[in-house]
């Protein structure tokens, strides 16, 4: 499914995406393609779910955000409903199910610890679920994974 050009493109966008006014034109120059070809390839890779997300990753703490991991005990029959409520908050960055008594885990980021707590309290209030663990990070371990394709 991936040709050599796709692999080279993926290698670049993982680690060296150009931060310039015309990044796709820059990529095109590096790969010997037209800008339209680069955009079409990336679109195809997104549609094929080879690329899940194309965007910047930054350290939220360094730009003033606070966050915590949360875990809720959600009855199985309410998973979709509670997930919809959790996901409607712009500060929720991840939400996933686990095979555990506390089965819905999500992260909340906001500008202050008080705002994080207010979001969590609103989720608890709107869902009626009171059993919620707040698990703020004690130590930060950032794992960088790059897939060398070419």
Image: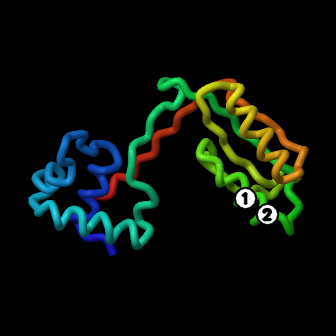
Q: Which mark is residue 79?
A: 2
Q: Which mark is residue 126?
A: none
Residue 86 to residue 46: above or below: above
Q: Residue at x 78, y 58 (%)?
A: 82
Residue that mark 1 sits on: 83
Q: Residue at x 83, y 45 (%)?
A: 124
- Residue extending farthest bottom: 1
Residue 90 to residue 97: above or below: above
Badge 2 marks a residue whose secondary structure is helix
Marks 1 and 2 sit apart, C-alpha to C-alpha, by 6 Å
What is the quadrant of residue 77 in the picture?
bottom right
**Could you tell me residue 96's position as x and y percent?**
69, 55
**1 and 2 marks in contact (CB < 8 Å):** yes
Query: Can you say which quadrant of the picture contains the C terminus?
Result: bottom left
Q: Residues within 10 Å of mark 2 (few under 14, many from 20)?
A: some
* 68 or 3, nearer to the observer: 68
**Could you tell me residue 18's position as x and y percent?**
23, 43
119 to the left or right of 65:
right
């Amino acid at each position: 499914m991936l040709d050599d050009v796709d692999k080279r493109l993926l290698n670049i966008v993982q680690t060296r995406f150009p931060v310039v006014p015309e990044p796709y034109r820059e990529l095109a120059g590096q790969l010997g393609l037209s800008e339209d070809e680069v955009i079409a390839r990336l679109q195809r890779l997104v549609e094929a779910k080879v690329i899940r997300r194309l965007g910047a990753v930054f350290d939220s703490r360094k730009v003033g955000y606070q966050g915590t991991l949360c875990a809720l005990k959600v009855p199985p029959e309410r998973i979709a409903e509670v997930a919809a409520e959790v996901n409607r908050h712009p500060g929720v960055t991840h939400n996933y199910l686990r095979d555990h008594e506390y089965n819905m885990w999500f992260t909340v980021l906001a500008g202050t610890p008080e705002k994080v707590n207010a979001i969590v309290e609103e989720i608890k209030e709107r869902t009626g679920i009171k059993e919620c663990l707040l698990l703020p990070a004690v130590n930060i371990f950032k794992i960088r994974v790059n897939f060398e394709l070419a």
